[in-house]
């Protein structure tokens, strides 16, 4: 997908002191990059007699292929299934912001929609290589509307379809041209589905089985017709049964074409799939497991109501549900309350409590990778390949994506030992940093704002090797030590006040990575010869917990926090660094800590 950039005169980058994922193993080798591709150093030495133009010490970190997300419905307020006037700008925004989660390529996913939405949206999302603008678009994933009514999940029932007499022409009439389409999810038990599967695979489009009540025999027949993928295994399909395991049985079926590898998506967000189910799937068929986020537009925002295609969803903590109808703000409803015990739960015009039907995830890819590693006990290499190599193999891109072999695209992610993203590269240049003072890049972070739930999110807008090269710092990221990471609500807005100027500051905490981001105005943030806040500390209010967070102009926050912070329930203790006086205890937000 990448143009010929590897001219002999291009600069050569050598990444040293790193562990690179290659051939299923983490190897203590250097990574060489030129012209946007991985370079073979032996050819460089012996044929061109050249050395690196620039060396970058990675500090012992892991270099893995960039993550590939083949099922993402939107994020950061952007809904791919909404027919807006400028669809491309929304896709571009998501492409930029998933870089900080290690994603270098993705398949924008559309959920079940009316034909007019497909006709307007699909032509506006072309295949596009990644670069400074953001992650690459590999093609669209169309999930529905040719799926089961019984297992529709969060897909609106009114727009579901079955195949008519001329099935493939019916599909074309629904979707429009398929030039930008890479994956189609359908239910194989629908009449005439097999002729559609054959027609799609003949065009190079991956067919995935999902939102289905198909038994194992129907699923096996679909694989013989050309299907190669299973959409979010275990979710929206018949549960495993010992006499007929359904679609799940494809993982160990002996009736599949010789040499055919069945891939299956897993949402490892801690909500959609129990850890035991993750372990069962991985141990049964590890080489076919593909991690997907199934992220919805609420990714990166917060609690409240958001859209997913033609429906509303309610986000509560780490879970998103199909929303019920809102209560009447003018008083009680005139109609009687709903007396029906819905099974399965679904949105009801008489219900105001919402439903318990899951509607996608709000976990980014790096979180899914870490949860999958913890839940399955697999190797680090296996967890990383499930988010990189396996989706590339699914799409037939394993020569250029999902690998750090010589000649592959130089799309990779830098990770620490706990698999937190430190930097993301596409074609060689760094496009996203982590804000960790110990790392060798600095990033200016910007945050989207949800009108109902304002929140600051760790997202890169530009990167410079040194802090004073950035045009203007507006945020500061601080990583908390392990013992202080509990008790934070995901995406919680933290009410802050600076200690010296007394102005309001917004903050956001990631409970997984332990990173707190504080957002300042340029006047409040700029101080002295070195970009540093004028304040010496801030109080963070999170319900029953108060935390005093000292900020140091030396930028060595991570090391000093371990020495100077203690947090207890309902009170705060601040142990100052050497040379600073200790303020009084139990400060309230807005009181000085100088």
Image (tube, rainbow, N blue to C red):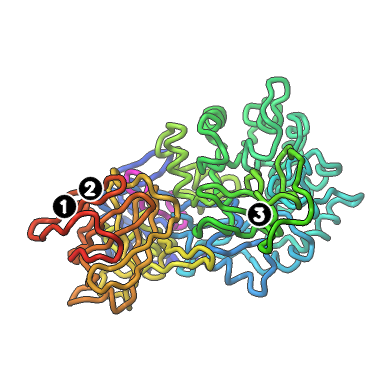
Categorize mark 1 by other alpha carbons within 10 Å: few (<14), some (14-19), many (20+): some
Q: Earlier in the sequence, mark 2 or mark 1?
A: 2
* Residue occupied by mark 1: 575
**Label 3 close to label 1 by CB (< 8 Å):** no
Q: Which mark is residue 566?
A: 2
* Residue occupied by mark 3: 141
Please tell me whether residue 439 belongs to the stretch shown in magenta.
no
Q: Earlier in the sequence, mark 3 or mark 1?
A: 3
Which-is-in-front pick, marks 3 and 2? Answer: 2
Q: Main secondary structure of the magenta part?
A: loop
Seen from the viewer's position, the closer of residues 512 and 279 is: 512
Q: Earlier in the sequence, mark 3 or mark 2?
A: 3
User: Which residue is outermost to the top?
Assistant: 243
**Label 2 close to label 1 by CB (< 8 Å):** yes
Which-is-in-front pick, marks 3 and 1? Answer: 1
Q: Residue at x 57, y 61 (%)?
A: 137
């Amino acid at each position: 997908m990448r143009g010929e950039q590897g001219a002999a005169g291009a600069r050569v980058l050598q990444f040293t002191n790193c562990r690179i994922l290659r051939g299923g193993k983490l190897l203590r080798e250097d990574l060489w990059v030129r012209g946007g591709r991985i370079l073979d150093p032996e050819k460089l030495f012996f044929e061109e007699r050249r050395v690196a133009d620039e060396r970058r010490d990675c500090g012992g970190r892991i270099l893995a292929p960039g993550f590939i997300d083949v099922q993402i419905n939107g994020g950061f307020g952007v809904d791919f299934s909404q027919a807006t006037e400028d669809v491309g700008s929304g896709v571009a925004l998501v492409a930029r912001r998933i870089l900080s989660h290690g994603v270098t390529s993705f398949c924008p996913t559309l959920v079940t929609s009316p034909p007019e939405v497909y006709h307007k949206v699909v032509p506006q999302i072309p295949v596009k290589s990644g670069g400074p603008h953001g992650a690459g678009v590999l093609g669209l994933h169309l999930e529905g509307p040719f799926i089961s009514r019984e297992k529709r999940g969060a897909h609106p029932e009114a727009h579901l379809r079955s195949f008519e007499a001329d099935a493939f022409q019916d599909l074309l009439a629904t979707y429009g041209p398929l030039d930008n389409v890479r994956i189609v999810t359908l239910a194989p038990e629908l009449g005439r589905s097999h002729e559609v599967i054959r027609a799609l695979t003949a065009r190079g489009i991956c067919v995935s089985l999902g939102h289905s009540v198909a038994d194992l025999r129907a699923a096996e027949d679909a694989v013989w017709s050309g299907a190669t993928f299973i959409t979010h295994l275990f979710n929206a399909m018949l549960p495993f049964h010992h006499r007929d395991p359904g679609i799940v049985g494809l993982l160990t079926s002996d009736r599949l074409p010789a040499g055919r590898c069945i891939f299956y998506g897993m949402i490892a967000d801690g909500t959609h799939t129990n850890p035991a189910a993750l372990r069962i799937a991985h141990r049964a068929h590890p080489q076919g497991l593909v991690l997907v986020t199934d992220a919805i537009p609420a990714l990166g925002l917060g609690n409240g109501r958001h859209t997913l295609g033609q429906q509303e969803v309610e986000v509560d903590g780490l879970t998103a549900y199909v929303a019920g109808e809102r209560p009447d703000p003018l008083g009680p409803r005139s109609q009687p309350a709903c007396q029906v015990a819905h099974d399965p739960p679904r949105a009801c015009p008489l219900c105001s409590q919402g439903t318990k039907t899951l509607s996608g995830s709000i976990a980014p890819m790096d979180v899914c990778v870490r949860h999958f590693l913890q839940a399955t006990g697999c190797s680090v290499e296996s967890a990383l390949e499930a988010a990189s190599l396996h989706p590339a193999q699914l799409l037939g891109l394993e020569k250029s994506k999902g690998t750090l072999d010589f000649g592959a695209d130089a799309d990779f992610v830098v990770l620490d030992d706990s698999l937190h993203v430190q930097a993301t590269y596409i074609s060689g240049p760094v496009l996203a940093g982590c804000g960790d003072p110990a790392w060798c890049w600095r990033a200016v972070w910007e945050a989207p704002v949800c009108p109902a739930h304002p929140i600051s999110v760790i997202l890169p807008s530009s990167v410079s090797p040194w802090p004073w090269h950035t045009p203007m710092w507006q945020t500061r990221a601080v990583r908390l030590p392990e013992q202080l990471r509990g008790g934070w609500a995901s995406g919680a807005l933290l009410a802050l006040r600076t200690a010296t100027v007394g102005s309001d500051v917004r903050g956001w905490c990631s409970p997984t990575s332990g990173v707190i981001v504080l957002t300042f105005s340029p006047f409040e943030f700029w101080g002295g010869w070195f970009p540093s806040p004028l304040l010496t500390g801030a109080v963070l209010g999170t319900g029953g917990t108060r935390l005093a967070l000292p900020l140091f102009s030396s930028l060595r926050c991570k090391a000093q926090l371990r020495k100077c912070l203690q947090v207890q329930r309902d009170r705060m203790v601040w142990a100052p660094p050497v040379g600073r006086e200790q303020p009084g205890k139990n400060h309230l937000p807005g009181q000085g800590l100088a």
